[in-house]
Structure formats: C-alpha cells, structure tokens
Image (cartoon, rainbow, N blue to C red):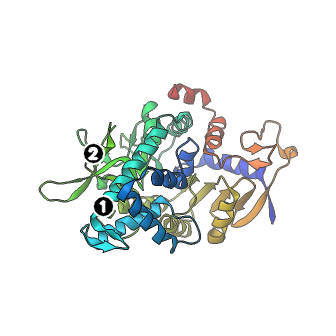
Amino acid sequence: MDKINIIREIRELKTHLSYSKNIGFFFGAGTSCALGIPNVEQLTTGIEGKLTGDFLANFKLVKTDLETIITDRKVNIEDILNQIRRIRELTGETAKVYEGVSGENSKLLDKEICTIIYDIILDKESVADIDKTKKFFAWLSLLNRDFSKEVFTTNYDLIIEKSLEASQIPYFDGFVGSFEPFFWQESIDQFVAKNDMTQNWIRLWKIHGSLSWFWKEDEKTKAQKIIRIGKIENIKKEDNELVIYPSKEKYDSSKKQPFIAYFDRLKNYLLSGELLFVFTGYSFSDQHINEIIFNCLRQNNRLTVLVFFYQDAEVENLHKQTSSYMNLNVFGPKKAIINGNLGEWEYDSADLKTNEKSDSFWNDGKSEFTLGDFNELVNFFITNSGKKEAIETIVK
C-alpha cells in the first residue's frame, strides 16, 4: 500500500480552506455522536427497550422479517421505519394485514416510534455540551465569502439550531412565518443573489427531517403540509406526526416532495461551479445521497470533496466505490484516499517547518490522524483561522 505524507496533505488542506471562495458542509450522524447523541444502533436498542404490548410485538414482527432480507449488517430503526411506512402504503392504513401487521397498527407504531425517538434524543440534547458546534458556526459565520454558507445534514436532532441560536447567528432552514412556520419550497429552489440581505446567513438543509417538523392536514383540502413547532412539553399530546427519516418507498408522494426538494438542492449546489464541500460524521450508508455525490463528482471538475472519517474501515469501503475520482480526498485515522489512491499515512516530525505544529491533527502516541473526530476538526479550523479571539467572543 502506498505511503501518503500527512504533513504535505495538511498543507494542501490549509490552502483549500484559505483560498476556496465557496465552501459547504455535510454533517452526518457522527457529528452528533461526538456530542453524546445516540447513533442509529443505540437508538434502535433504546426504542425496542421502551416499546411495550402490541407496539413491541409488531415491532419484533417487522424486525424479524427484515432480518431475513438484510443479512450483511444489523437491522436498524431506519430500516424498520421504512418497512412500517411501506406497510402503511400497501394497506392504505386500514385493517388489511401485510407481513403480520395491519395498516392501522403500522400507523400507530410509526407514531409511537417517532415519539420515543423524540424523547430519547431530546433527553440527550438537554445535557449535551454544544460548545464545539457553537464554535464551528462562529468560525463559519466569520468566513469572508461571496457565496452563501450552506450546511446539509441527515441529523434530525436540534443541536445545530440550538448552537446557532445560542450564539445569535442568523440562519435559514426553508421555513417562513411566525405563528406556525411552514415549509416554503421556493426558498430552497433559488440560490441567494449577491445583493440579498440574507447572503451571509447560514443555510441549513435537514434532508432527513427534524424533531421540530410535523405533518399537518389542511382542514379543507386534506392536503398535508410541513410546519415547524418550537419546544413541546409533552410530545405524546401532539396529534401531528413527526417529519423524520423519509421513506425509500413511494409512501404518499406528497410526503416525499419536501425531501425531493432538499435532494435537488444538494445536487444543484454540488454542480454550481467552483466549490469545496466537506463531509464530517457521514458514513456513506445512504445510497440515494451517494448517487448524487458521485454523479456530481463526475460532472463538475471544479468540485473538490473532502471526507473525514472516524474509522479506517469506512475509508476502505468508500475506496471500492470511488477510486476513479480525482477530486475526492478522504482522511481516516491511519489510511487515506488521495487522487484516487488508497494509502497509509506517513508521518515524520522532521518534515515540519519551524512554525508548524502537528498536535492539531496528529496523535503521536497512537500514530493517528485525529480530524475524523468532529471535536478535533473544529479545533483545527479554529486554530488555523487566526480568528480565535473573535470566535470566543461570539460563543460567550
């Protein structure tokens, strides 16, 4: 396996961050996990432990059936939700039964699972230290760019929103209104004009939904729309269904539309010309998102994608799919993909210049690259920004 000089690549990374006019980010579950929010496996276990009675029985029926289909990994809560919503579609949410579960019961189970997800995640959020995300967005807000700053995420927790609001950093997430903010698709379709007063706002696109989004039925037309609700004291008393994790099936085409708009936004953004796009905490397990990314890498040779992984296994898995992409660089603890080549990091302190230090990206004791950890990545951005004092002022 080739050796890759880590110090040379860090210099290249710093150059990218300093001179790229347009920079965007994609946050996966790993960013929230770094702050104590449960990952999908932990969430699956936690939900199963809280279900009782018919809910638990139907949950196990769905899970057991999926385990005969998904054999290369553990079945998780997103697989289960997708199957439950498939049952809802196929049965019309009636007494009809599919794979042992009725449509009526699948709807009730869907709502119960989402209620438990809400409680589990918000409980963890209440004690999470959001200092690092606050600092990240303070750093991002201070970047002097001519383009809007866009952040896409599959996370449906509210860590990002809490961090932005705690630091009074303006952002826009596709919702408008005050009494009952509603999703406005046109706001996502359009790119920000240079003279727009909101040009320097953070654009936050939550492509798997959010714990603050709910489906609401129009009393007259019976059409579904997404509204955003603030803090809810008792989620069990909320009649409207949470909008989290879009089904992979054609479950109610009207309910897929908001997510289609977000996916289109991601594609158009990645094809918008010169762009540095950074992934952190994302494992590349969502094939729909992956297809968009890989297609855009092929179509836009002015797109540079940087991926930071917490585990080397993720580097190796991604290399099997992306070895032909010269505009994709991937950083793992001991391995990397640079210009399509998979290699191992090589570190020699003698390569450091007089004013260079490696402690912001390298663990000498473990001989590992550390920026796959979201907390360490944020530290790196701040350390090399020259704006540490300004950032600290914002987050106080």
Instruction: Please give the label number shown on residue 380.
Output: none
Quadrant of image for the N terminus: bottom right
For label 1, the crowd category at 10 Å Cα-Cα, with few meaning under 14, some 14 to 19 and many 20 or more, is some
Secondary structure of residue under mark 2: loop
Toward which corner of the image does residue 343 lie, by quadrant?
bottom right
On the question of residue 248 being in view, the answer is yes
Which of the 4 quarters of the picture holds residue 345?
bottom right
Q: Position of residue 365 (x, y in %)?
A: 81, 43
Q: What residue would you read off at disc 1?
A: 107
Alpha carbon separation for disc pair 2 and 1: 15 Å
Choose the circle earlier in sequence order: 2 or 1. Answer: 1
Q: Nearer the viewer, residue 80 or 283?
A: 80
Q: Residue furthest right?
A: 350
Which residue appears at 30% of the width and 53% of the height? Answer: 241
Is residue 42 shown left or right of residue 57? right
Would you say residue 154 is visible in this rendering? Answer: no
**108 relative to 366, above or below:** below
Front-most of 234 and 241? 234
Classify mark 1: helix, strand or loop: helix
Kindly identify the amino acid type of the residue bearing the numbered disc 2: Glu
Q: Residue drawn at (53%, 71%), measured in percent from left and top?
A: 70
Residue 136, percent across and down?
A: 55, 39
Amino acid type at circle 1 is Lys
Of 370 and 86, nearer the camera is: 86
Residue depicted at x 33% and y 54%: 111
x and y percentages locating residue 353 in the rendered image: 82, 41
* Residue that badge 2 annotates: 238
Q: Are marks 2 and 1 in contact (CB under 8 Å)?
A: no
